[in-house]
Image (tube, grey):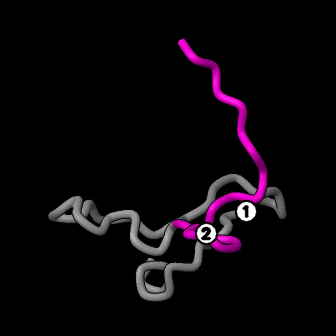
Amino acid sequence: MDEVAETGEPVLITKNDVPVAELVSARRKPKVLFGLMKGSVTYIGDIISPAEVEWEAESG
């Protein structure tokens, strides 16, 4: 358990070479929500420049 807590790598638990459980590190709840999702989004391409595709919008 100390190794899992230290490294964060899960450990597979087997019985007669059959997987029965997986030991994973417990995730602690952050004290604040600001910045909780930091690093979880990947930007692909240019998100600032206008799109080269014209859109057709319905007028309601």
Instruction: Look at the picture and state if 54 lies above or below 38.
Output: above
Instruction: Look at the picture and state if 2 lies above or below 57.
Output: below
Q: Position of residue 15 (x, y in %)?
A: 74, 59
Q: Position of residue 57 (x, y in %)?
A: 65, 28
Q: Residue at x 84, y 63 (%)?
A: 17
Instruction: Look at the picture and state if 6 lies above or below 53.
Output: below
Q: Nearer the viewer, residue 6 or 16?
A: 6
Q: Which residue is mark 2?
A: 49
Q: Secondary structure at mark 2?
A: loop
Q: Nearer the viewer, mark 1 or mark 2?
A: 2
Q: Position of residue 7 (x, y in %)?
A: 50, 87
Q: Quadrant of the N terminus?
A: bottom left
**Could you tell me what secondary structure mostly forms the magenta stretch?**
loop
Q: Amino acid at mark 1?
A: Thr
Is residue 20 shown in magenta? no
Q: Position of residue 46 (x, y in %)?
A: 65, 73
Q: Residue at x 78, y 51 (%)?
A: 53
Q: Which residue is mark 1?
A: 14
- The reply, left or right, for residue 8 in relation to residue 56 is left
Is residue 49 shown in magenta? yes
Q: Amino acid at mark 2?
A: Ser
Q: Nearer the viewer, residue 1 or 28?
A: 28
Instruction: Look at the picture and state if 9 lies above or below 17.
Output: below
Q: CA distance from mark 1 to mark 2?
A: 53 Å
Q: Which mark is residue 60?
A: none
Q: Secondary structure at mark 1?
A: strand
Q: What's the magenta region? A: 41-60
- The reply, left or right, for residue 34 in relation to residue 1 is left
